[in-house]
Image (tube, rainbow, N blue to C red):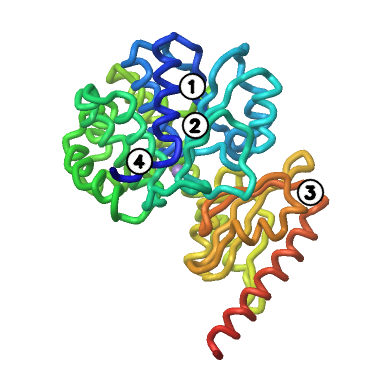
Amino acid sequence: MTTEMKNLEKVAERLKRAAKEGERVILFGDSDLDGITSVMMVKETIEFLGGATPSVYISDREKWGYGLSKEAVCSINENPPALIISLDCGISNFEGAKEAKRRGFELVIVDHHKTFPELPEASLILDPMQEGDEYPFKKMANGGIVYKLSEKMLGKDFSKTERRFLELATLATLADMVPRKEDNQRILEKGMGFLKDSSIFPLKVLKEVIGEDSFLEKMISLLNITSPYGNVNSAYLLLEAKEKSEAEKWIEKIKKENEERREEIKREEEKIVGEVSNEEMIIFKEGSFSAPLAGTLASRVIRKCKKPVFLYTKESGIARGSARVPSGQDAVDAMRHCKRYLQTFGGHPEAAGFILREENVNDFKKCLLEYFKDQEEESCRGEAS
Ligand SMILES: [Mn+2]
């Protein structure tokens, strides 16, 4: 028998029971394409099994911070008992998990981000990065994991939805830029072909608007960061649109948002890169950009400057930011080293996020400088021996 992800079977059984017994389910997804497509697949799987339509919440990073934060759980406008499923987030949301429990919700976490030595309080956790997970491939997008979860839940009936889910999992895999091998390769091999003539109606409409040329790249850059709208966001509303006119309305909104964001990113990138001096070991800066752009900006700055980048914005005494480090270094490890200054942090070794109180910003920076200085010395010793 081949090894399965830890808790894949248990989570599948739990969600099937929720569907069959008509339990109230709340899906909470991260705001990028990986989170959105994960939500769509779980929602459709539960509906297929006869469950009640789950409520959907998409993370609003500006308002609630990263993932299923305490603020996010407080904003869930539902009464317990209900089952919250966090998708593409949750594994680093210790306070959010506590708050869910306090309010009387059951929490199941489905995530692919790096885990910490302790895990948040949840009834079940599906994350191939967790201890004791023997599944050999650890680099699936969350959408890839949910694809497998749905397959497990639906059994033979999975064939009815396989094509659509392959397309959704492909969007997640491309948007999260995970390595194109193993499970990811298998998803992409079929999904890329299907996406050329997509079965997802709003994507057909989008193709008419933006054209065939580099459609996938353009679509992902349009839909991966969009603005919050009610409990969800505009990319989710587009992908769920049933009518052509509705899809067109969201496409127009998203295009306009995107244009404004591109201009802001260009302006801010030039400003940050222009201020970097050669002596600085890390780039650690407060920005004047809007908070959700920190990640995109950090990714662009590191491409030019090739050293650890920490960008943040401040609001009501709280600093929120994004970190990117050159390959071979580990932003999550760096923040773990400095966690006494942080409220929350999480993500992948090369790309992570953090939240801290404004008064701790200077100490956090000092701590990071020490950490990266030690790293450098270690790597020098490594080269000499
Ligand atoms: Mn993801």
Query: Where, quadrant-wise, is the C terminus in this rendering?
Result: bottom right
Label 4: which residue? 144
Instruction: Say above or below: 4 vs 287.
Output: above
Q: Could you tell me if residue 63 is visible in this image?
A: no
Residue position for label 3: 358
Q: Is residue 228 left or right of residue 310?
A: left
Look at mark 1 in the image and give the residue it sits on: 56
The amino acid type found where label 2 is placed reads Gly
N-term-proximal mark, 1 vs 4? 1
- Please provide percent x and percent y for residue 106: 58, 22
Q: Residue at x 59, y 68 (%)?
A: 274
Q: CA distance from mark 1 to mark 4?
A: 20 Å
The answer to the question of whether label 1 and label 3 lie on touching residues, with beta carbons closer than 8 A, is no
Nearer to us of marks 2 and 4 is: 4
* Tag 1: amino acid: Val
For marks 2 and 1 on the same chain, the one whose residue lies earlier in the sequence: 2
Secondary element at image label 1: strand
Circle 3: element type: helix
Residue on which the image places disc 2: 29
Q: Residues within 10 Å of mark 3 (few under 14, many from 20)?
A: some
Image quadrant assignment for residue 307:
bottom right
Of circles 1 and 3, the one toward us is 1
